[in-house]
Amino acid sequence: MDRRSAMKQLAVLTGGVIMIPSCDFSEEAILQAYQNLNITASQKALLTRVTNTIFPGTTLKRAEEIQLQDFVLVMCNDCLKENQQQSFVLGLKQWDDFTKQNFGQAFSKMDQNEAADAIRETMSLEAAPESDAALLGRFLAITKQFALQGYLSSEYFMKEIKPYELVPARFFGSKKIENA
């Protein structure tokens, strides 16, 4: 190996070693599919837990099986105004801490019954319009609205639960016509 290539490799190695401390690998990546929301994978997992609490899958399929969390995020990303999107994301970010403060346990660590009670109680709170409880109530209302819309328009619901028929559908005539 000649001296010139050894010096070049040493310079590249030294530059790499100097740059390593400035690289921060601890930050979670933002999901690119929802560019207006700027949410991370852990926040999406929390939203999955919330939608699974709303649709637990006791008699019907769970929300996660139908991928309602993705439907909720797409609807929030595409259909809400910018201020509504910001309040939704802020509510999603604060939800785990809020449940830890008010219910003694983080939402992601609660069992199904505790999680359902936490959602019910938070949605029924009467709070000042600018408080955290009101923000979280709006977050839960938006999540519930879009989750229900997604469930009722899902392929599973339309094919297996309430089969969809094109208009005018069937006619079930049962009236006898008599001569007058």
Image: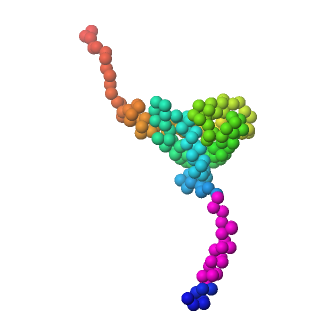
Work out which quarter of the rendered image holds the N terminus and state it.
bottom right
- In this orientation, which residue lies closer to the viewer: 19 or 70? 19
- Residue 47 position by quadrant: top right
Q: Main secondary structure of the magenta part?
A: helix
Q: Residue at x 72, y 38 (%)?
A: 101
The residue under the point 36% across, 34% down is 166
Q: Position of residue 13 (x, y in %)?
A: 62, 77
Reply yes or no: does residue 176 show up in magenta: no
Question: Magenta segment range?
Answer: 8-26
Q: At 61% across and 37% down in the image, what residue appears?
A: 110
Give x and y (percent) for residue 180: 27, 9
Q: Can residue 91 be seen here?
A: no
Rendered residue at 74%/34% (across/down) = 128
Instruction: Examine the structure image and report whether residue 20 is included in the region drawn in magenta.
Output: yes
Tell me where residue 39 appears, x and y as whole percent.
60, 51
Point out residue 22 in the picture as x, y percentages from the top left corner: 68, 67
Identify whether 63 is placed above or below 12.
Answer: above
